[in-house]
Image: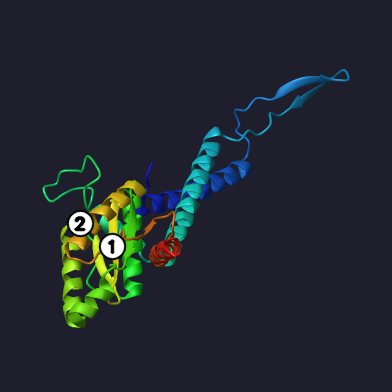
Amino acid sequence: MIFNARTLSTCLALGFMLSASASLARSDSMRAPAPQHRTEQTVLWQGEELSVEPKETFVQEYSNLILVGMLGLALGVFYFAKRRAWMHFREECPNEEVIDEVVDALSKDKSGRSYAIVPRALPTTPFTEQNDIDTLARQIEIAAKASTRLSRTVGLIYFEPQNYAECIERHGSEKTRQVMSSLVSELRQSLRSSDHVTLLGDSQVLICVCLLSGLTDLESITRRMFSIVARLGLTGRTTQRAGLAIYPINGYSGGELIRAAEENFLGAAKTAEEIAA
């Protein structure tokens, strides 16, 4: 059962009032003289008859009042403790409000119909054109947690086209920048609306794919991305390599995921060089 703030505040106030009323009623009953109609009991003690007054009994209604009061107090304390813990969680996780907005938008589409299955893309993307590393890391983390709430995850694909250096030698820096810009544009068009593609530096491509079911999906998308790289003439004879990272196996924060994908790419490249040597 879910209680809102007004209901629980009322319970708390009611608990105080009932407890106080019960205490006052009990104290009054203790101070009140014995009713005149109360009969005495006669017992035989060592051959003599003695009269004994019945003991004072606490009225059952007072016990019920105190029980209700204690319940109200317990509900009030529980609410305030839960509220304080939630506010502390908000302070520790500032991205949580943005994640809520992304996930809440998934509950209904514009026509008011609820989603029966996990949507193909997040309806509200956390990504913007601002691609400094700190902002990008935060956006990846938001996308990861939003996807997790839908029993999915996000993955990163990090690579540098094999023929990048050769492209500069043949066509110059300006032409190469245009080619890389075209590559990013085509990669973005081949992905879903809430996925993201950006350049880290001049040649490092980073792709974030949302709502993945697992690593197999990420590997399949990577092969599709490399077909575009090859079509633009940026892949050599050897197989294009990529560094992959998936949440939360390779990291819980956006920064950790980016570093894991980069390290995976550099490790694969080093291994390929050792094999070639």
Q: Quadrant of residue 255?
A: bottom left
Query: Looking at the picture, how far across and down is residue 13, in whole percent?
Result: 44, 53
Who is closer to the viewer here, 51 or 56?
Answer: 56
Callout 2: few (<14), some (14-19), or many (20+) C-alpha neighbours within 10 Å?
some
Whether tag 2 and tag 1 are in contact, CB under 8 A, the answer is yes
Q: Is residue 29 above or below residue 97?
A: above
Q: Secondary structure at mark 1?
A: strand
Q: Can you name the residue that lies furthest to the right here?
A: 46
- Identify residue type, mark 1: Ile
- Mark 2 and mark 1: span between their CA atoms? 9 Å
Who is closer to the viewer here, 86 or 201?
Answer: 201
Q: Is residue 8 left or right of residue 22?
A: left
- Identify residue type, mark 2: Leu
Q: Is residue 246 left or right of residue 223?
A: right
Residue at the disc numbered 1: 207
Determine the residue positioned at 63% across, 36% down: 34
Determine the residue positioned at 63% across, 33% down: 57
Query: Looking at the picture, how far across and down is residue 264, in whole percent?
Result: 42, 62
Q: Can you name the residue that lies furthest to the front here?
A: 277
Q: Is residue 249 visible?
A: yes
The numbered dot on residue 191 is: 2
Determine the residue positioned at 37% across, 58% down: 244
Q: Can you name the residue that lies furthest to the left here?
A: 111
Query: Looking at the picture, how far across and down is residue 39, in whole percent?
Result: 65, 25
Q: Secondary structure at mark 2?
A: loop
Q: Is residue 1 left or right of residue 124?
A: right
